[in-house]
Amino acid sequence: MSVLRVFCLFFFALPLLFGMNSLAMAERGGATLQVKEVLNRAMEIQTDPELAGEENRQERARLIRQLIADNFDAQTMAENSLENHWGALPASQRNEFRDLFIVLFQDSYTRMVLNFLVEEDVRYGEEEIPADEGRKVQTTIMRVSEHIPVDYTLHREAGRWLITDVEIDGVSIVNNYRNSFNRVIRASSFSDLLERLRAQKEVIMAHET
Amino acid sequence: MIEGLAAQPDVVELMKLVNRDMSTQMVGELFTGFLDDPAVTEGSDNGSEPPDLEFLIKVLKGLNSHLKSDAHYVSPWPAVVKGATWEVDEEGYFWHGDKKFLIAMVVPERKRGDLTQYKDSLDHLRKLIHETQALHPQVQAGVTGQEALNNDEMITVLADMSRATWIALLGVLSLMVLILGSIRRPAIEMVSLSVGLCWTFGWTTLFIGHLNILSVVFAPLLCGLGVDYGIHWFSRFRQEELKGYPEVQQVIRSVATLAGPGIVIAGVSTALAFLPFVLTGFRGLMELGLITGMGTILLLIADFTVIPTLSTFLAGYNPRKKVAETETSERNLVRLTPVTARVLLGVVGVASLGSAWLATGVGFDLNPLRLQAANAEAVIWEKKLVESSDRSILTAAAFASSPEELREKTRAFQALPTVAEVQTLHSFLPERQEEKIPLVRSLVHKMPPLQEATTHFGPRHVRELKSTLERIRFKMNEEQAEQWGAAQPTMDQMWKVRSLTGETLAMLENEEEALAGLQGYQERFYDDLAETWNFLREGAVAPLMTTEDLPEEVREMYYHEGEYLIRIYPSESVWEEGSLARFINSVVSVDPVVVGDPVSLHVFSEAFKDACIRASMLAILFISVLLMLTFRSVSLTLLALVPLVLGTLWTVGIMGWMGMDFNLANSIFMPLVVGAGVEFGVIIIHRLRDGKVKPGTLPLSTGRGVVLAALTTTVGFGTLMISDHQGIFSLGFVAATGSLCVLVAALVIMPAILLVAHKRQASATSKGV
């Protein structure tokens, strides 16, 4: 190999290496930015004077539900919450379960945001890169003489970061679903679980109307 | 949490575990709560059971007190049990009244043949309590229960009766000296009365051998009633001595001839008023009836032997008084005109109608607790227990001869709404042991051996604790919890935790100072944890508990010679007649052979009431027959009964006006009034039958005797009112009032009736002519 060829290779490769590194940097910050964006938007909805009061709760709930739908990968969460059972399910049951899960999760998370999140001082920590190429964004909600850590797990899909789990003070929402669903399936059956999810969806729908 | 604590048994780790548990519960409730509980949706009520933060509150309080150098440790572990009512130090005792009272059951030793059979035992018990109480002045303690109530009642009554007897004797003597104007003659009467009482005591000792709570009142009663005969004797003596007999024996003979029959009839009538108690079949009343009835006869005998004998030498007879006194011998105590007599009878008619109306409000109060002296210790404590609980401590008892019968009867008693609790030998054993034992045993596997605690805390521990407390505090936002639909008790607990964590965090700011307090709390915490841990582990391997494991005293009490005891606690106070009757009727429907204090109380009070009514009816019947035989005239018999009938009616009317009911003590007033009422009537009729008395008048000598007899009777009965025992007081009040009413009826109404009757007869005769 000639010196020129070596030089050219180095010349062209260097920007590529640098470029790749900067891309990785951008991706690392991207997950945090994504979480920050979601949290800021949620706090904006919660503190918007035009949406304040009990009479606007439904509207706030609608906006937050939409925010969750846009930024959480609830389909993946549904799959993860069933873990070993997922593979054994027929397509029809998977689809029904997924749809039910999405409605229920979005409703629960909406309630949590509506009831607990206000204008918060959120501290963002280091972004971790777990083995599955995803990201874990550490945040802490700070108040006077109190705080709570909330960690978000994200993965990239179709060029954007989507949240697949949230750990509230060390307790994973997906793990909680998994444990609870397992308990019901062990005690009775998957059909029973589906039945309970359907019943809860009915309650949510009735309440919304 | 248990595993985590076993591996690292220190307070910092405990707080982390608590926080972790709270987070898990919070996330679980928020996202999957609907799988366990009623459906929860955005905006709907939270249907799950709220968390109990009592354990955390206790830990924080203990920690704070150590951080403040005010080392006050309270074990948090009892709060782990739901409801936080489990206190190891407080289990295994007989609690009463929402854990306000601790009951110790004591079986007193009985001393037979004594009126207060348990006095020695109770005195000793009270002495021990007072000695112990002196060491713990902040604790109040006392003795109550059926035996203590009986004992206190008897002691109160005996002391009061002793005082009342002396006061009655003194009062009667003073009245006699005052009205008879002599010291010698009342003294003779007192000697006669004392002899009569001595004979009565002797007779009682020989034929009955003891007194009871009813018959113990006989001495003051006889003082009041028995002295009357001597009074009538000396009243007539005073009149006869003015006739100028040369010898005192002639005066005595004249008194015996003229007044004697009336006095004897009066005495026998009084005896007949009491003796019907013998026919009631009620032992307490039978003995009272026998003692007072026979006592009256004995007093009468004493009056007809002691008085004439002593009068021969000591009556102070002076034949020369004749001239000076003759002029006054015809004076009358009562002198009515026909108009006055009619007006009087009209007034009496109105008063009697009013009394009859008021009498309709008088009932029977059979609650014996209300009769007791309010200041008696046993009464004070019994009332406290009754007021503090909806359960009585007096129990009924049933028996079973096999475990199957025991189970069956227990179940049947428990099903009754009138029963609060059923206690048997098996009540002292844990319930459903067969189901619980596997669960308890499984605890051992869930409780690994406790590791050694962290011996020394450093700044790192303080920082970790601060961080954990801040995270706990974040979750204790009661405003947000309210929005979430949390209940008030939960929000109160959250507020407490928030406040306590705030204090703790402030004290943890100075790490150096905080370390000492943290270390101090850790040491106490670990010791307590180790003790609780071992207690649970040891308890988890304990075998099935059987009746053989119970203390012998308890076993003996509930199982003896093949018979199982079933103790039945009433759900309402047994001191109220209605609830007592409901309780007895229901338990008897399960087992007709039920015994115990409530049963005795029910049977006693009902039988007593019936016996008093029956005895009063019999007394009136017997006396009416006696009067018919004596006077051989229906009209005179009816006239002799007038003071009794009107006096009784007015007395009951006054009771109604005073809001007083008949009770277990004053129910025996009727024979007392019967005795007095008939006595006055008989004495007056005997006097009026002399033929020398004008209609509408009552000679002074007879009137004075009746007034004095009535006043002495009133004093005799009235002295009972000095008693602290409410029953004896009410008997004294009713009997004294009755004797005054009878006096007024006898003095005024009898001459008025005779005058009106005489006028009508004269008018009819003149018309006939």
Image (cartoon, coloured by chain):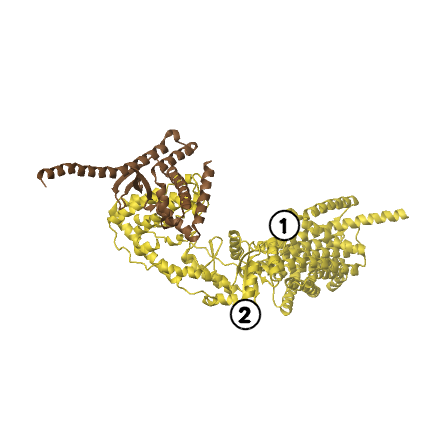
Chain colours: A brown, B yellow
Pick whichever, B675 or B1, lies toward us: B1
Residue that label 2 marks: B562
**Residue neighbourhood size for the residue with mark 1, other residues' Cα within 10 Å, grouped as few (<14), some (14–19), many (≥20):** some
Pick whichever, B500 or B391, lies toward us: B500
Look at the picture and state if B268 lies above or below B522. below
Query: Looking at the picture, how far across and down is residue A192, in whole percent?
Result: 45, 49
Query: Looking at the picture, how far across and down is residue B583, in whole percent?
Result: 59, 56
State left or right for residue B423 relative to residue B181: left
Q: Amino acid at mark 1?
A: Met
User: Label 2 is found on which chain of the structure?
Assistant: B
Look at the picture and state if B523 lies above or below B657. below
Residue shown at 28% from the left, 41% from the top: A137
Pick whichever, B242 or A72, lies toward us: A72
Q: Amino acid at mark 2?
A: Gly
State left or right for residue B410 relative to residue B218: left
Residue that label 1 marks: B660
> Secondary structure beneath disc 1?
loop
Pick whichever, B720 or B432, lies toward us: B432
Query: Looking at the picture, how far across and down is residue A93, in whole percent?
Result: 42, 46
The reply to the same-chain question for discs 2 and 1 is yes
